[in-house]
Image: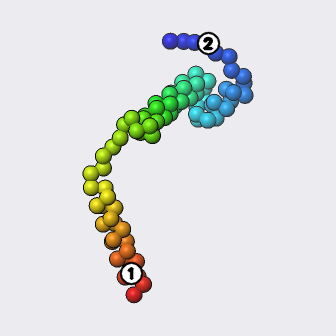
Amino acid sequence: MKITVELSDSEIKEICRVTGEKKKGPAIRRLLAELLMRKRRERLAQKFIDAEWGVELKGFEATEAADQAANQHDAERWRH
């Protein structure tokens, strides 16, 4: 689908600079695609923040405790 939008020369130059594209059409397409991707990620992240979604990390606490014990052991070995 083609659309017509009015952008200033400075906006076009900045869009090209930010996207790394040299031509206007590809630069605008890339900018919009990246913005849409960012918005999708924000919506997904918000679902975790709002506790609408969650993740169960089985064994996380045990692994964390084992890592801390190993780090403590290593630290004591360095001191002696």
Mark linked to residue 4 = 2
Quick one: SS at disc 2?
loop
Q: Residues within 10 Å of mark 1 (few under 14, many from 20)?
A: few
x and y percent of residue 78 in the render?
41, 82
Judged left or right of residue 19, residue 74 is left
Mark linked to residue 28 = none
Q: Residue at x 72, y 24 (%)?
A: 9
x and y percent of residue 71 in the render?
37, 71
Mark linked to residue 76 = 1
Q: Residue at x 27, y 51 (%)?
A: 58
The amino acid marked with disc number 1 is Glu
x and y percent of residue 28 in the render?
58, 25
Which is more toward the observer, 41 or 59? 59
- Which quarter shows the C terminus? bottom left
Quick one: SS at disc 1?
helix
User: Quick one: which residue is furthest to the bottom in this view?
Assistant: 80
User: Quick one: which residue is furthest to the front in this view?
Assistant: 51
